Image (spheres, rainbow, N blue to C red):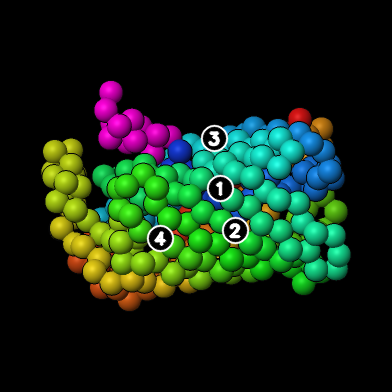
Amino acid sequence: MNHKRLGHILASILTPMAALMMPHGAVAQNPTDQADAAADKQFMVGVGVVQIQSPFKGEGTLVYPAPLISAKFGPAYIEGIEAGLKFQPIPGPISPFASAFVAGRMQTGRDRRDFTVDAGVRVSIGGKFGELTGEYRRDISGEFKGGEFQIRYAYPISMGDFTLTPSAQVNWLDKETANHMYGVTATQRARAITKQRKVILPVAPILEKARNIGGVLTGTYSVGGGVTLIGVLNSTYLDKPIRNSAAIDKKWESSAILGVTYSF
């Protein structure tokens, strides 16, 4: 099995999990985790369903099953398709902390789901005001050799067993990343023709960098006994270079996720 075929299989299985990484740690940041944050080891498994509203012409709504996985071993962690080292925050009213990670990246669209890998760093400052995070990641698989910078602000609201976390973010994509995520190649068009899709997207490269603006609403409810219900709503307003593409017919890209997890 060649690496391209393996990538397509991994992308089909793991695409839903990518949405759970935004905001970072949405899977793991539930009341159960917060209660034993000092533990050296934490594990969580679960299952859910993700609904994605594709911005590409004729694709509409896509629905996938979503395996949910999170594990922590001291400073090392795995959350969905991301793994890394998270350095402990410095105690105080304002607590800075950082992490280094590798993470999978998938593209939206039935015939565009190539699996690539990024490496990145994330620096956050947390306190009573919420959490402000800056992140930079870059492709290390050699598929598109692009990078992306993100600034995100999140404010968790705890109401007993229920926690609601609204967040807002801005993503700056260089032209290589914008093209990889939203451009359509001749190979991808040929793939759609081979599969006899009703709508065949035109070859449409993205030739400029882009700045997308989005928001995420994450809710978790601790049922008890280690069981937690999770809901995530995610919406991104696409920048003009992407919206002007002949393959794009929506200004927004969005997703919704519902799941249940068990922590032990």
Q: Earlier in the sequence, mark 3 or mark 2?
A: 3
Of marks 3 and 4, the one in the foreground: 4
Q: Residue at x 40, y 34 (%)?
A: 10
Q: Residue at x 30, y 61 (%)?
A: 176
In the picture, the quarter occupied by the C terminus is top right
Q: Earlier in the sequence, mark 1 or mark 3?
A: 3
Question: Which span is picked out in magenta?
Answer: 1-13
Per the rendering, the mark at residue 122 is: 2
Is 131 magenta? The answer is no
- Residue 137, given in percent of the width and then of the height, sits at 47, 57
On the image, which quarter does residue 53 sit in? bottom left
> Which residue position holds label 4?
147
123 with respect to 183 (left or right): right
Tell me the element at label 4. Answer: strand
Per the rendering, the mark at residue 101 is: 1
> Which residue position holds label 3?
67
